Amino acid sequence: MKKVFVFILIIILVIGCGPDDISSDNEILVPVSVEEIKPGSIEEFVEATGTVQSTKEATLRSEISGEYKLLINPATGRKFALGDRVNSGQVIIRLEDSEYENTIRIDLKKLQLEQAKTEYEKQKSLYEKGGVTQRELKTAELNFLNEEYTYENAVIQLNKMKVVAPFDGVIVELPYFTPGVKISQGLPVVRVMNYEKLYLEVNLPEKQLDVVKINHTARVMNYTIIDDTLNGRVKQISPTIDPGTRTFKTSLIVENPEWKMRPGMFVKVELVVARRDSTIVIPKDIILSRQRGKTVFVIEKGASQERVISTGLENPEVVEVLSGLEVDERLVTKGFEALRSRQKVKIIR
């Protein structure tokens, strides 16, 4: 009976004690992680997707009919193939036709040009000494010019037997023809691309029309080339809105110096429309929405303090704080969900 009495007395004493009688030493400390606020930089950007295209490409066709001959690539020691680099002016294919070549008579026309040039120079020298009339000099000059034009035209006709790369690039299409078979005039025989620079067209929301400007920079990323981000720049902006999608077209040029990104790739674009340096930037996911506005928690003298903030630039990850926080204050980045103002905390790392 004595033990029961003591137990009942303890219960009465506990019930009789109000909350003010409990020692503050027993208050639960909420564990939080903090970081000191330091000035930083922020970029606000518009996200979009699109497909990149080459800025230079050409489908080369046979200008005459002739026997097909795919030439050897000096860089590889084998016949030209898909993916081979070619230089401007490099001959990729020859179309051989002895009859066509004979009708041009390039050697004869070259010899006639040399003779006409010699005669003109002779008549010019004599005219300066008074040995021939001006009319004789003009006749020699006219004959020289005629032979020069005739020879140049013969060279043009002869060059039609060659399929030549019009610029530095890569072979992306090479239809197969049996070596030595005679192919007709006008057939596509090779396609060359240069994608050191890429062209990209994206559709942006109507509300961004007054925000996006010519020469704004952009980051361009492909999902299969995760570690490589290319730089782009806005070149053209359509002034009209598509009534169906409520978007406008924007064209970018993308630098691709190592040729890693390929035409036809689907890419993600971050078009930078604003940037600010030396400003307070905090993670976007730590901001709480209250009736009085956006709030975050800071730590002062071991206790939490809720702050109402106003924000400026933002992107999907971070936001600029215009007021409500100061540099070097300790900002709660983890554990803020369970906090209330003036609550004791335990800082963990």
Image: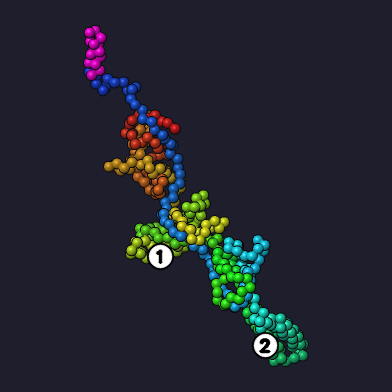
Residue at 71% x, 81% y is 107
Q: Earlier in the sequence, mark 2 or mark 1?
A: 2
Q: Is residue 205 magenta?
A: no
Residue found 63% across the figure and 75% down from its top: 67
- In the rendering, at what x and y percent does residue 231 appear? 50, 55
Q: Position of residue 164 (x, y in %)?
A: 61, 71
Q: Position of residue 162 (x, y in %)?
A: 63, 73
Viewer-proximal residue among 122 and 316: 316
Q: Which residue is mark 1?
A: 238
Please state which of residues 229 and 208 is positioned toward the viewer in this rendering: 229
Residue carrying label 2: 142
Up/down of 189 relative to 11, above or below:
below
Badge 1 density bin: few <14, some 14–19, many ≥20, Cα 10 Å: few
As drawn, 312 above or below 89: above
Q: Is disc 2 placed on a helix, strand or loop?
A: helix
Q: Amino acid at mark 1?
A: Ser
Query: Which residues are drawn in magenta?
Result: 1-15
Is residue 4 found inside the magenta-colored segment of the image? yes
Amino acid type of disc 2?
Leu
Contact between labelled residues 1 and 2, with CB atoms less than 8 Å apart:
no
Identify the residue at image location x=31%, y=42%. 289
Colouring method of the image: rainbow
The quadrant of the rendering that contains the N terminus is: top left
Residue 335 in percent (x, y) is at: 37, 35
Residue nearest the viewer, comparing 311 with 208: 208
- Magenta portion: prevailing SS class: helix
Depth order, front residue of 36/92: 92
Q: From where the camera sits, is residue 247 visible?
A: yes
